[in-house]
Image (cartoon, rainbow, N blue to C red):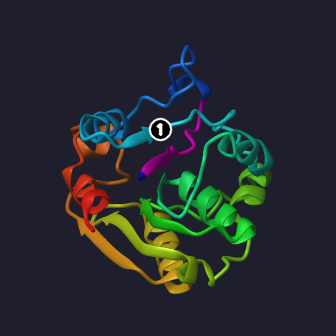
Amino acid sequence: MKNIIIIHGCPGREEEMMNLADRTFDKHWMPWIREKLLAQGIKAETPMMPSPWAPDYENFKKEFEKYEVTENTILIGHSCGCAFLVRWLGETKQKVDKLILVAPWKIPDEGDKGREEFYVYPIDETIKDRVGKIVMFTSNNEEEDGKKSLEIYHQSLGGKVIELNGHGHFTMGDMGTNEFPELLDVILEK
């Protein structure tokens, strides 16, 4: 049975965050996509990663590994969530059905040691041998470092790049909607 795990991005400040009551991330397109998948009987989870405004790989890993990942799992990352998933897949050598990177990020701000430790690692190019399908979403009006980050991931992992117009960094503010039907289509593709 398929299951989906969506790992959110890393906001600049704590107050930009989450619903602590149920430890899920409830921003941008994630609640919409989760609802659409659940309506089709597909298990979809959006775990709340610990202190994402100050991301720490080991803390993310400890939380993430509470969820079952199998060869039938589809992993979706947004922004820094992509950096986490790619690093985790490289370390664990886990096989998965699909890896979907939405507005992937890999470039830390100058002088930000914490994010540098999170983002700066070599990408294991053998990931592409263990993933059934790799898809990356970007936008024509994504930030320059976002475009560079996408290129870094694409050069290492290959896969399909989908560029959408006017989606920015795929946040509610940039997209102007919480609906993301293009992502739903990629998830449901055989």
In the shown orientation, is residue 103 left or right of residue 20? Answer: left
Q: Quadrant of residue 121?
A: bottom right
Left or right, residue 123 beside residue 6: right
Q: Position of residue 185 (x, y in %)?
A: 22, 58
Q: Is residue 189 left or right of residue 71?
A: left
| Residue ID at (28%, 62%) | 186
Q: Which amino acid type is shown beneath numbered disc 1?
A: Glu
Q: Is residue 57 magenta?
A: no
**Residue 54 x/y as whole percent:** 71, 40
State the residue at coordinates (29%, 33%).
35
Residue depicted at x 21% and y 38%:
177
- 154 w.r.t. 168: above or below: below
- Does 75 sit above or below residue 5? below
Relative to the observer, which residue lies in front, 144 or 139?
Answer: 139
The span shown in magenta is 3-13
- Dot 1, how many residues are within 10 Å of its Cα: few (below 14), some (14-19), or many (20+)? some
Residue denoted by label 1: 45
Does residue 178 sit above or below 188 in this rendering?
above
- Look at the numbered disc 1 and give the secondary structure of its residue: strand
**Hey, which quadrant is residue 171 in on the image?**
top left
Q: At x 44% / y 75%, what residue is drawn? A: 132
| Coordinates of residue 23 in the picture (x, y in percent) | 57, 24
Residue 4 counted in the magenta span: yes
Outermost residue to the top: 21
